Amino acid sequence: MATACLAAIVLVMLGEYRFMSLAIPAALFAVFAIVRPRAAALSLLPLGMLISIAFEWGLAGQLDVSQVTAAVVTACVAIVAAGVSIRWLSGQFRLSMEHLLIGGLGALVLASYLAPPVTVAQWASVNSLVDSRHFPGLLVCLLTLAITLVVPPKPAHVLQLFVWSSVAVAVFAFSQGLYGSNDRLYTEVYYSTWLGIIEGPAVAVCIGLAYARRTALWLAPAAICLSCVIASGSRAGTLAAAVGVTFYLMTLRSGFWRMLLLFVLGASALLILWYGPSVEDLLAPLRDGSSINSSDLHRSGLLSSSLDLIAQHPLRGVGYGNLVQMIEISYGPRTGAHNDYIRLAAENGLPALALFLILVFLGVWPRQQGDLGVVRALVVSCLVWIGTDVALPHPVISVHFWIPLGCLLAARAKAAAMPGDAGVKLTRSFRRRSRSRSRAS
């Protein structure tokens, strides 16, 4: 808050040289990252989610808001990485095995980014037009993941910051957003689909916190986020919320009750779809049917073209960012394959996709309790929109996936560093000492 107030004062004093005021919060944030690297890493979550609001209000001037926000978040990630590196060189932090996987994936992405683009037969007419490099946002996201793995914030802090940042985005969208020709809510930076992939997982987190904390107060932000998902008409957001809530409720049960819950939910879904509305009406009740059909037709063409590229270049891929530019040139101003799993494999090769899935599996597979269980449901909820959108390499929009995944990987690394039954043995030895002392007294 003090940094924001100081920057506002300098904005007024400098007048037309307002861009110079960015040096002040950057310097203060650098000191903050060195002194408190864990808190600085946690601050990347609300910074990435809310920075677009500040620039949409006019601070970006004539610049492109999306590019400015990505640049600011990238600079902040680099500053935090420098602060963590200083602490690591001094021996205060340790790296884990998961960092090798992150480094391997980053090496594949960097090689794909630096390598010259491949020549594709059916894209011969557009190969010569693909000459500019795409912003390597996935490398920034992997750096964020590595930082969170070194200095993991508390799960409760991650969940609360994510929920209230999502509420702030929803309120901003309702107050400053517009409705397009298809009656979908959007803003200049927060597109309709991006509102869904932010607010949908937030609904799952709110319900998980309401159950874990045994309080209904968390249902209030859940209602705000759910209303924003419905207004945006995002099918991915609705499906992400449903999958996250279902996954969290299933992890609370075991054996027979888990299977019974799964059977009841499946039977209810089948009955609703058989006797009630269609899937599209359930996922996007306020969205026009013709808009959905047009979107599905367009997505199917993009997916088939991307799969063809994977078949031709399974190991290397077509190069980082080249898939997006090829599709934009041929299909118009649309980005990617609308499936980040396929996009990752098409641009960087199947080994990159395999490393990414291994990281996700290592983070999600161990069963967690309490707040970490809600973080686990958040990551699973995000895995839904990763398969329907192209926001994974965006360091602003996808920050609520990378930081929670880092928390899960850090919890797994911490558990693996301890001997298998160390905690149980320690508890038993403490009990034995307590009993002996009571007998002696």
Image (cartoon, helix red, strand yellow):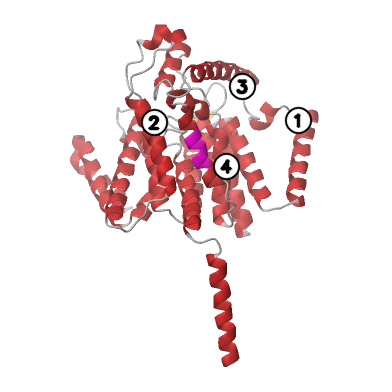
The residue pinned by badge 3 equals 292
Whether the magenta-drawn stretch holds residue 48 is answered as no
Considering the numbered disc 3 on the image, is that residue within a helix, a strand or a loop? Answer: helix
At label 3, the amino acid type is Ile
The residue pinned by badge 2 equals 109
Considering the numbered disc 4 on the image, is that residue within a helix, a strand or a loop? Answer: helix
Looking at this view, is 49 or 140 the one in front?
A: 140
Query: Which residues fall within the magenta stretch?
Result: 354-360
Looking at this view, is 432 or 15 the one in front?
A: 432
Tell me which label, 3 or 2, sits earlier in the chain: 2
**Residue 370 visible to an observer of this rendering:** yes
Q: Is residue 77 above or below residue 271?
A: below
**Residue 242: x %, y % from top left:** 64, 40
Q: Nearer the viewer, mark 1 or mark 4?
A: 4
Whether the magenta-drawn stretch holds residue 357 is answered as yes
Query: Disc 3 to disc 4, how far (Cα)?
Result: 25 Å
Q: Assign the magenta stretch its main secondary structure.
A: helix
Residue depicted at 33% across the width and 52% down the height:
1
Q: Is residue 284 above or below residue 28?
A: above
Task: Answer with left or right where residue 228 lies relative to residue 20.
Answer: right
**Residue 379: x %, y % from top left:** 54, 43
Query: Residue 62 sits in which quadrant?
Result: top left
The residue pinned by badge 4 equals 380
The residue pinned by badge 1 equals 273
Tell me which label, 2 or 1, sits earlier in the chain: 2
Query: Disc 1 to disc 4, how far (Cα)?
Result: 24 Å
Residue depicted at 55% across the width and 37% down the height:
383
Looking at this view, is 114 or 372 the one in front?
A: 114
Residue depicted at 44% across the width and 20% down the height:
323
Q: Residues within 10 Å of mark 4 (few under 14, many from 20)?
A: many
